[in-house]
Amino acid sequence: MKWQRIPEDRVFRVNGKLMTVRVDPGETLLHVLRDGLGLTGPKAGCENGDCGACTVLLDGVPVKSCMVPAAECFDKEIVTVEGLEDRALTEAMLEESAFQCGYCASGFLVNLHALFDKHENPPKEVVDEWLASNLCRCTGYAGIRRGVERYMNKR
Amino acid sequence: MIQPDVSYGRPSTMEEALEAYRLEQEAGRKAVYYAGGTEIATLGRKGYLDAQSLLDLKGIEEATELSLRDGVLRIGAALPLNVVIDSRLFPLFSRAASGIADRTVRNRLSVGGNIAGRLPYREAVLPFLLAGASVVLFGPEGLRKLPLMDCFDKRIALEAGEFILRFEVPEAALHLPFYSLRRTGPAKVDYPIVHAAAVKAHGALRLAFSGLCAYPFRSAAVEEALAASGPKEQRVRHALTLLPGPVREDFRAGREYRLHLTVLALGEILENLEEAE
């Protein structure tokens, strides 16, 4: 087993592209994405796993990137909000004015993208469970809920 | 940043993990095992992470197993909670663990990490305590398989350098009638004020709690008191005098409110499980 003890250049697969970035073994995935790769879609909110603004997909599974050691992600497929190809969900959110300041938007969009990848037509309790992972400090939850419903009706 | 000047290693066998742990200790560096990383990230951010080396157990096959064979469900300790919850192989686990943190966090938070971590709730242990599960540990003494009830007193007893490999649940216990109630404050995503879980096995009720005292527990005295004859309310009141420790009191709830919620929970459990086959 090889220890990583000092910052090293590592190759990450992010949004379908191979990218080389210097990774400190004590750094979180969030800051490698933002500061190392310039992908500022994932936001630094609470940095405590509570708010979900930093949500990204790791091998298709939504995770809070502020809680993931970057050193373990070199063999994973990472997708940030910049890499989401399906615009229909974003459009539905815009049509419902779901987001106000927008700081939480990328986390909600990534998480909802994963929800609809896993469940074609999720029942309300499943949507509620997934939405509970993200906080909106503008308290725009009703708009976000309308955006989800609009998207589900359009699918 | 979780912590500056920390080292990261990902062993691929349990022997390799143990050897790496030993060598780090010899070199004067404190190593910690982890799988999900949620707790180390939180502790590190606050400057409370007392370790210089992180040993990631997710590369160890035996720690990521999820299988039902030969009458035993094996649940690797490095598996994320959601993998076990979503498998529906152990319905009580799916119910009891689905209130822990939020869904996205549960995609990382590991079964072993929840149970061996520093937070006092450790709700994932409740279904294992109720199902008569065993725990398989690996450490300097090699592999040890123990009934969980024998090595869980407030927290799981691990030797220095030892880690949890997996939990083993007898297939016969997977589908026992169960009831689980988790009460939080106004926010649904929060630590429990009281989490009471129960199964009915061989005609007897088994109960386990988190949030009620400073640690999770299953108590034979409480179970016996509830099984005694007499009016339901009297049995519940008597059972609550036999708790293994003081009732927790914090900013989430005072002692009286916790006890009140527990009385209600026990009433519901008795109502739903006493007549169950």
Image: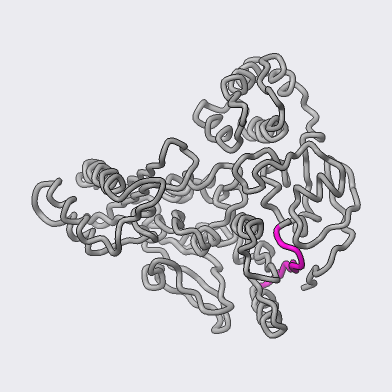
Q: Nearer the viewer, residue A60 or A139?
A: A139
Q: Which quadrant would residue B257 be assigned to in this image?
A: top left
- At horizontal 74% and vertical 67% (from top left) the residue drawn is B6
Instruction: Give the total number of marks visible in the rendering.
Output: 0
Whether residue B127 can be seen here: yes
Q: Is residue A15 left or right of residue B122?
A: right
Q: Is residue B3 magenta?
A: yes
Q: Is residue B136 left or right of residue A108?
A: left
Q: Is residue B13 above or below residue A83?
A: below
In the picture, the quarter occupied by the N terminus of chain B is: bottom right
Q: Which quadrant would residue B53 be assigned to in this image?
A: bottom right
- At horizontal 36% and vertical 63% (from top left) the residue drawn is B132
Residue at the farthest left position: B230
For the rendered model, the colour scheme is one colour
Considering the whole magenta stretch, tell me its main secondary structure: loop
Q: Is residue B230 above or below residue A6?
A: above
Q: Where is residue B113 shown, x and y percent of the image?
A: 55, 60
Q: Which residues are magenta?
A: B2-13
Q: Which quadrant would residue B269 be assigned to in this image?
A: top left
Q: Is residue B247 left or right of residue B251?
A: left
Q: Where is residue B107 shown, x and y percent of the image?
A: 61, 47
- At horizontal 71% and vertical 62% (from top left) the residue drawn is B3
Q: Where is residue A90 shown, x and y percent of the image?
A: 73, 23
Q: Is residue B144 above or below residue B194?
A: below
Whether residue B276 can be seen here: no
Q: Where is residue A82 shown, x and y percent of the image?
A: 81, 34
Q: Is residue B178 left or right of residue B189?
A: left
Q: Nearer the viewer, residue B236 or A13?
A: B236
Q: Is residue A103 magenta?
A: no
